[in-house]
């Protein structure tokens, strides 16, 4: 906060304020009178307002001051430095080469696609230091109006995925080339919460008893283990431990490539219920000589898009059930475990959650009571509701 002060030697007024972390004192020939103080106070208020807005020009107010030339030279040097920073496109190439070693192939492909389709056309030929916050906000507003093939606009999640690499690139460049990142203060778009849509136990029974025989065991394992699509599609027999009655989740099938699990929590052992154990024993008679537990006639892993298109969605339509993603089978497992009274800690381990926090946040309305069990309550729920025939050893042909 600046002040209007009076010199001790001659009583003349002077400005005393801070600019760019420097104390600035500019003398005047005005006597110390209430009228002069008021006039200078008004001028000081304008100065401070312009400083706050980043619009202050020292030379405009104090053209004869040595400080004016000093700040002008600093501004000119800074402008030259920002203009001399690499082009966004050039630095992006360097950044991608450095980052790709720590990314999954699928994630890397997604980042590259978003950069080439949206970000590089907008910022590729600009110097990194010259990109402004206003341009970033304008870019985000522009892509929010992009129309997809189905007629809708990009979702908040999709927009955030496009913007995130831009933020990372600008922040990294700001650190390396010593300028303030224009991304500072820009928050991600708020993503609406999506409610889980699990199936009821009766709907699960209907699905498994109606689905074509070569997929009965596949969906039974999905519904009663909580495995992700990529995890069950990438499940190999070497990770099925019949002796300990456990499924070892060690890898996932993402875009046709086996990769490590999503995170450390996903690296887990799932306890088999009796029904899952029996289903996998029957499945072993069919594909036990193959690499993958669930595979096509050639022994190759199932392609989830084809399975969804040719098996899952037609089945839901046939049964008159609301259209839902196959991933809802994972949510169904969690809600059935909770409904049967299993321990939240045990459920979290089965799902691959490191704590029970997400369990309660996502599935809280499905918790009727809490007990301390170890899987037996779930066994009783299944045995009392489901009578399924798992003895059809056909091979999946999708």
Image (spheres, rainbow, N blue to C red):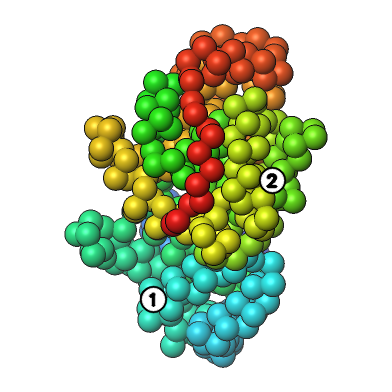
Which residue is at the front of the view, 150 or 73?
150
Secondary structure at badge 2 equals: strand
In percent of width and height, residue 11 lies at: 57, 61
Residue in view at x 61 percent, y 38 percent: 282
- Res. 108 image quadrant: bottom right
Residue in view at x 51 percent, y 82 percent: 88
- Of the 4 image quadrants, the one containing the C terminus is bottom left
In percent of width and height, residue 30 lies at: 47, 66
Asked whether residue 191 is in view, the answer is yes
Relative height, residue 379 to residue 92 (above, below): above
Kindly identify which residue carries mark 1. 117
Which residue is at the front of the view, 282 or 267?
282
Residue in view at x 38 percent, y 81 percent: 121
Which of pointers 2 and 1 indicates the residue nearer the eye?
2
Which residue is at the front of the view, 28 or 3?
3
Is residue 386 rendered to the left or right of residue 135?
A: right
Is residue 356 rendered to the left or right of residue 364?
A: right
Secondary structure at badge 1 equals: helix
Residue in view at x 44 percent, y 41 percent: 213
Mark 2 or mark 1, which has the lower sequence index?
A: 1
Relative height, residue 91 to residue 208 (above, below): below
Is residue 179 rendered to the left or right of residue 223?
A: right
- Res. 141 image quadrant: bottom left
Asked whether residue 17 is in view, the answer is no
Kindly identify which residue carries mark 2. 249
């Amino acid at each position: 906060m600046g002040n209007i002060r009076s010199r001790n030697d001659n009583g003349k007024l002077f400005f005393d304020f801070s600019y760019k972390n420097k104390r600035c004192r500019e003398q005047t020939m005005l006597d110390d009178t209430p009228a002069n103080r008021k006039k200078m106070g008004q001028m000081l208020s304008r100065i401070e307002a312009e400083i706050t807005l980043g619009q202050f020009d020292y030379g405009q107010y104090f053209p004869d001051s040595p400080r004016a030339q000093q700040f002008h030279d600093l501004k000119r040097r800074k402008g030259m430095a920002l203009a001399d920073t690499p082009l966004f496109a050039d630095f992006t190439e360097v950044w991608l080469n450095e980052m790709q070693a720590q990314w999954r192939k699928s994630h890397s492909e997604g980042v590259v696609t978003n950069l080439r389709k949206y970000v590089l056309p907008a910022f590729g030929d600009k110097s990194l230091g010259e990109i402004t916050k206003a341009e970033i906000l304008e870019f985000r507003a522009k892509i929010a109006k992009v129309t997809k093939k189905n007629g809708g606009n990009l979702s908040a999640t999709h927009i955030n995925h496009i913007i995130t690499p831009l933020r990372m690139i600008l922040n990294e460049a700001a650190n390396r080339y010593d300028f303030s990142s224009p991304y500072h203060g820009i928050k991600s778009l708020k993503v609406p919460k999506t409610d889980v849509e699990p199936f009821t136990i009766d709907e699960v029974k209907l699905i498994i008893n109606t689905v074509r025989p070569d997929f009965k065991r596949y969906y039974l394992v999905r519904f009663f283990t909580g495995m992700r699509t990529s995890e069950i599609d990438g499940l190999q027999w070497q990770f099925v431990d019949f002796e300990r009655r456990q499924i070892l989740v060690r890898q996932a099938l993402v875009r046709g490539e086996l990769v490590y699990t999503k995170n450390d929590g996903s690296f887990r052992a799932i306890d088999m219920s009796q029904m899952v154990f029996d289903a996998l024993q029957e499945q072993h008679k069919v594909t036990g000589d193959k690499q993958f537990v669930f595979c096509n006639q050639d022994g190759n892993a199932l392609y989830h898009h084809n399975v969804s298109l040719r098996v899952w969605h037609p089945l839901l339509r046939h049964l008159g059930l609301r259209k839902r993603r196959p991933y809802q089978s994972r949510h169904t497992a969690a809600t059935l475990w909770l409904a049967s009274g299993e321990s939240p800690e045990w459920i979290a381990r089965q799902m691959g959650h490191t704590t029970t926090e997400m369990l309660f946040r996502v599935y809280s309305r499905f918790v009727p009571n809490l007990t301390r069990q170890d899987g037996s309550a779930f066994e009783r729920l299944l045995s009392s509701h489901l009578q399924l025939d798992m003895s059809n050893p056909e091979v999946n042909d999708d």
